[in-house]
Amino acid sequence: MLPSGGGIRVLREFTEHLSREFDLSVHVPQGGSLQPAGSSIAETVYPYPMWRRPTGFLRPAAPLFLMARLIGFQKVCRGIAEKINNSADIALVHNSMPVAA
């Protein structure tokens, strides 16, 4: 869930170069940036149904959904962290748009 541009480019550069020396796996919430097609890096996408902002007639109420979206995002991130804690030796973690905002 990085903004388009520099954040995604940095992540792809890191993973591309690190994958030459290490076995990598990428864990992302639904709606996050995916690895480019043809990448040999394992990727796990975790469900996060609230990653999109409300649209249509619910759009004016979008600020009311913010807390629910952030709580849901925290739960997804906690699940990802638990999975990484049980399966990885080292973790490289990037912040995301919801956390940075």
Image: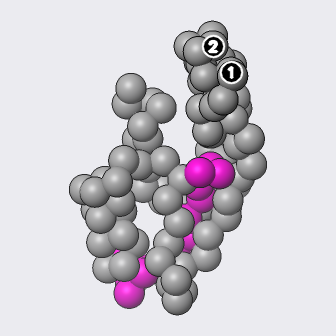
Q: Secondary structure at mark 2?
A: helix
Residue type highlighted by circle 1: Leu
- The amino acid pointed to by label 2 is Ala
- Name the side, left or right, on which 88 lies relative to 36: right
- Identify the image quadrant of residue 71: top right
Residue at left offset 47%, top offset 32%: 98
Q: Is residue 23 magenta?
A: yes
Q: Residues within 10 Å of mark 2 (few under 14, many from 20)?
A: few
Give the colouring mode of the picture.
Answer: one colour
Q: Look at the image and give the residue range highlighted in magenta.
A: 18-31
Q: Nearer the viewer, residue 76 or 4?
A: 4
- Marks 1/2 in contact by CB < 8 Å: the verdict is yes
Q: Position of residue 77 (x, y in %)?
A: 62, 39
Q: What residue is drawn where x is 30% and y is 72%?
A: 13
Q: Is 38 situated above or below 22? A: below
Identify the mark at residue 61; answer none if there is no mark. 2
Counting from the top left corner in percent of width and height, residue 83 is at 70, 52
89 horizontally vs 5: left or right? right
Image quarter where the C terminus lies is: top left
Residue at 69% in and 22% down: 57
Residue 44 in sight here: yes
Instruction: State the residue at coordinates (42%, 81%).
Output: 19
Q: Is residue 40 left or right of residue 30?
A: left
Judging by the rendered image, the residue that carries numbered circle 1 is 58
Element on which disc 1 rests:
helix
Q: How many marks?
A: 2
Query: Residue at the left extreme?
Result: 6
